Amino acid sequence: MTLSLWTDVIGTLAATLTTISFVPQAWLTWRTRDVAGISPGMYALFALGVALWLVYGILLRAWPIIVANAITLTLALLILTMRLRYGPRRSAAHDRPSPSGRTGR
């Protein structure tokens, strides 16, 4: 194999693995609508970073970078949108009265 082919294989494998690793978080968030542990600031910065990686891939015409970051950006924006829409939830245990009669708030 040539160096160029190895570079493409490694890039494609890295892009595939990092994108796939993001899917369970997006699926769990979508399914449960539980966004309490999600930082909107972190996800906004993450989405911006991924968008810049997408532009970088487009400028290089590097399909592994383009495809992986387009998918990851979509998932990150989905999670960020759900975080902004549903906001943090309080747990039911947090609202229950304690033995002293006061709530957890």
Image (cartoon, grey):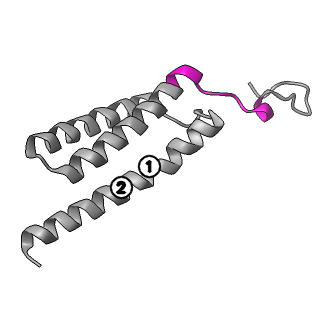
Classify 10 Å Cα crowding around label 2: few (below 14), some (14-19), many (20 and above).
few
Where residue 59 appears, as percent x and y from the top left, is: 9, 40
Where residue 2 appears, as percent x and y from the top left, is: 7, 75
Magenta segment boundaries in residue numbering: 83-94
Where residue 79 appears, as percent x and y from the top left, is: 48, 33
Task: Tell whether label 2 touches label 1 (CB within 8 Å).
Answer: yes
Instruction: Decide which of 9, 83 is in the foreground and name it.
Output: 9
Q: CA distance from mark 1 to mark 2?
A: 7 Å
Instruction: Decide which of 99, 81 is in the foreground and name it.
Output: 81
Classify 10 Å Cα crowding around label 1: few (below 14), some (14-19), many (20 and above).
some
Instruction: Give the side of residue 8 with respect to residue 33, left or right.
Output: left
Instruction: Decide which of 64, 91 is in the foreground and name it.
Output: 64
Q: Quadrant of the C terminus?
A: top right
**In the figure, residue 35 lies in which quadrant?**
top right
Instruction: Give the side of residue 25 with respect to residue 3, left or right.
Output: right
* Secondary structure found at label 1: helix
Q: Which residue is mark 2?
A: 18
Q: Residue at x 45, y 29 (%)?
A: 80
Q: Residue at x 22, y 49 (%)?
A: 65
Instruction: Give the side of residue 1 with respect to residue 46, left or right.
Output: left
Q: Which residue is mark 1?
A: 22
